[in-house]
Image: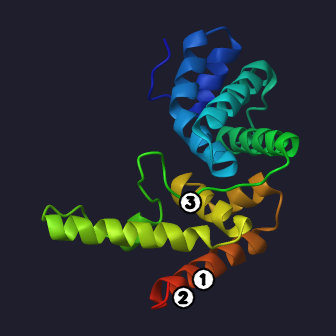
C-alpha cells in the first residue's frame, strides 16, 4: 500500500510495478511546483494549466523507464522547463511574471518580511513592501528571476538548479548573488 509519506523513489518503484495511486501522489506532491514554474515563463494561468497537464502526461509516459539513480524533482523540473520553453517558441514570446504565486504571495518576501501583522496600517505597509519587491523583481533579467524562483520557491539547491538549467554551478551561484544585490539596490532607491 502506497503512503503519502513515501519518498519519491519509493513511489516511483511502486508505480513501476503497477500501483497507479503512487503516480497520483507524485502528481499531487509536485503539481504546485510545476504549475508555478511554468506560470513564471508564460504569465498566463490558463496556458500554465495546459502546459502543466502536458508536463505530467510526459511524466506518465516516461516514468515506467525512469532511472531510479536520478533525482526525480530535478528530472521533473527539467521536463517542465523544456515544455514551457517549447510552448514559448511556438508563441514566439518570452514573458516572465513576478516571483509571486497566484495568491500574490512573494517567495522572496519570506526573506525580507516577518510574520503577518494584524493592524490595518501594518498590513497596508506590508502590501506596499510586497508591491515594491514584486516591481523590483520584475526589473531583473529572466535568468536571475529563474534562479531566484527555483531556489526560494522551488526549494532546489544551487547544484540542482545548475542541473536543471544546464549551467555550471558557479554561474548559478553568481546569478543568485547578483540578483540579490540588484534587488537590494532597487529597493533602496528613492525613485523606485
Residue 83 position (above or below residue 120)? above
Residue positioned most to the left: 119
- The first of marks 2 and 3 along the sequence is 3
| Image coords of residue 146 (percent x, y) | 67, 60
Q: Are marks 1 and 3 in contact (CB under 8 Å)?
A: no
Q: Which residue is painted at 19% across and 70% down in the image? A: 122
Disc 2 and disc 1: Cα gap in Å? 5 Å
Specify the label residue 4 is tagged with. Answer: none
Is 158 displayed left or right of 87 in the figure? left
- Local crowd size for mark 3, using a 10 Å CA cut-off: few (<14), some (14–19), many (≥20): many
Count of marks, rendered view: 3
- Local crowd size for mark 1, using a 10 Å CA cut-off: few (<14), some (14–19), many (≥20): some
| Image coords of residue 109 (percent x, y) | 41, 66
Residue 27 position (above or below residue 184)? above
- Circle 2 sits on which residue? 185
Specify the label residue 98 is tagged with. Answer: 3
Q: Quadrant of residue 138?
A: bottom right
Q: Which residue is painted at 63% across and 48% down in the image? A: 43
Q: Which residue is painted at 41% across and 54% down in the image? A: 105
Disc 1 and disc 3: Cα gap in Å? 15 Å
Depth order, front residue of 110/91: 91
Amino acid at each position: 500500500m502506497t503512503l503519502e509519506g513515501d519518498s519519491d523513489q519509493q513511489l516511483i518503484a511502486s508505480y513501476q510495478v503497477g500501483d497507479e495511486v503512487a503516480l497520483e501522489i507524485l502528481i499531487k506532491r509536485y503539481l504546485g511546483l510545476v504549475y508555478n514554474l511554468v506560470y513564471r515563463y508564460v504569465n498566463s494561468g490558463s496556458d500554465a494549466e495546459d502546459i502543466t497537464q502536458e508536463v505530467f502526461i510526459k511524466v506518465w509516459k516516461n516514468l515506467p523507464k525512469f532511472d531510479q539513480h536520478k533525482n526525480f524533482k530535478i528530472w521533473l523540473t527539467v521536463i517542465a522547463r523544456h515544455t514551457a520553453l517549447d510552448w514559448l517558441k511556438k508563441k514566439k514570446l518570452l514573458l516572465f511574471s513576478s516571483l509571486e504565486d497566484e495568491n500574490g504571495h512573494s517567495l522572496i518576501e519570506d526573506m525580507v518580511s516577518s510574520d503577518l501583522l494584524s493592524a490595518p496600517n501594518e498590513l497596508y505597509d506590508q502590501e506596499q513592501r510586497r508591491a515594491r519587491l514584486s516591481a523590483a523583481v520584475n526589473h531583473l533579467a529572466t535568468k536571475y528571476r529563474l534562479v531566484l524562483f527555483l531556489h526560494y520557491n522551488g526549494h532546489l539547491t544551487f547544484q540542482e538548479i545548475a542541473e536543471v538549467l544546464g549551467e555550471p554551478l558557479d554561474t548559478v551561484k553568481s546569478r543568485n548573488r547578483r540578483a540579490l544585490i540588484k534587488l537590494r539596490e532597487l529597493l533602496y532607491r528613492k525613485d523606485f
